[in-house]
Amino acid sequence: MPNATKASSSLPELTVVLTTAGDRRVLHRTLQAIASQTIADRIELLITSSDASYADEETDLLSHFHGVRFFTQDVDNVDFAAGSTLREARAPFVASIEDHAYPEPEWAEKTLEMFDDRTVAVGAAFMAANAGSRFGWVNMLIAFAPWSEKTPEGDIDWVCLHNCTYRRSALEAFGPDMYTKFNRESEILHDLKSAGGVFRFSPSARVRHLNVSSLQSTAALRFTAGRLYGANRAETEGWSIFRRLVYVLLCPAIPFIRYARMRKGIFGGHPQIAERGLGPVVLLGLVFDAAGQGIGYCSGPGNSRAKLVRHEMDRFEHLNRKDLEVFGAWT
């Protein structure tokens, strides 16, 4: 049962779900960011964690919110845990924020301003929290390039599953199994889109995202994400063995094709970085991704889903030494 430390008879405007597989220290920086929101007193906060010490140790930060509830459990899949906790929300709009994401103070306010009667989800603009890391930028750009501060405000074809805000009634339409649709394949987004829902984007709702930044973890993450993508694409589109083999043979060209398609959006959306210095590293990340795609086309997903879940479980394990010194410190 949840432990309600603060409640109000009036309804909140926004419910924010924070989920972590780690202890209180992992979530502390994210909790600081949510407590600093301009409309924090209108936010209901739901924390899902195996650590039960928040109520006693984070009283100053928790006092900023409209209401706070805790759900103590062992978290072995952050997406499923977040989806399950979202069912407990009281506000008409609900957001799931990762434990390595730090929303800027106006994020909540600007997000709510974007909802109209058609909107089922509003996406945020992603910024690099560890902007001094080259591999951090690689993972940031490959994963989040479509959602930069330079992306136009308004209707958008797709949003990111993580750090996104949803209309609660749109989620509830999928019934009690809704939480299982929060997965690596973003099934909930596909269903919302298929049901005629509209996604919108707010470049003013900014989130600083802490990205994988060690070389070893970057190679593993990009390869695994590529393998899952390749396996899902071949299965969903019903590829023949012949077509799979053709794509495997084409894999060496895929990084260069993707880079040519992405470079304008990547470097145009992030003028603070130079293509000359970062371009080759982005291309290397795409090479890892293409290698994974090739394995996925011919051998299926393997245990890629489980590996990607683990990448989301403890971000500190995947940082380079410099980033770990900065972001692993207790603040």
Image (tube, rainbow, N blue to C red):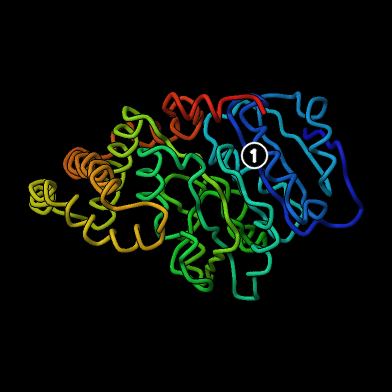
- Counting from the top left corner in percent of width and height, residue 265 is at 34, 62
Q: Residues within 10 Å of mark 1 (few under 14, many from 20)?
A: many
Front residue of this view, candidates 259 and 184: 259
- Counting from the top left corner in percent of width and height, residue 252 is at 11, 46
Kind of residue at disc 1 = Thr
Front residue of this view, candidates 102 and 176: 102
Q: Element at badge 1?
A: helix
For the point 10% across and 51% down, the residue is 250
Instruction: Tell me if residue 4 comes above or below residue 277 in the rendering.
Output: above
Q: Quadrant of the N terminus?
A: top right
Q: Please state if 230 lies on the left or on the right of 46 as rendered.
A: left
Front residue of this view, candidates 205 and 243: 205
- Counting from the top left corner in percent of width and height, residue 326 is at 54, 29
- Counting from the top left corner in percent of width and height, residue 248 is at 12, 46
Instruction: Tell me if residue 200 comes above or below residue 95 in the rendering.
Output: below
For the point 35% across and 49% down, the residue is 142
For the point 45% across and 63% down, the residue is 158
Front residue of this view, candidates 195 and 96: 96
Q: Quadrant of the C terminus?
A: top right
Q: Please state if 250 lies on the left or on the right of 185 as rendered.
A: left
Name the residue furthest right: 9
Circle 1 residue: 30
Q: Please state if 1 lies on the left or on the right of 178 as rendered.
A: right
Label total for image: 1
For the point 30% across and 49% down, the residue is 232
| Quarter-of-image position of residue 218 | top left
Instruction: Tell me if residue 229 comes above or below residue 309 in the rendering.
Output: below
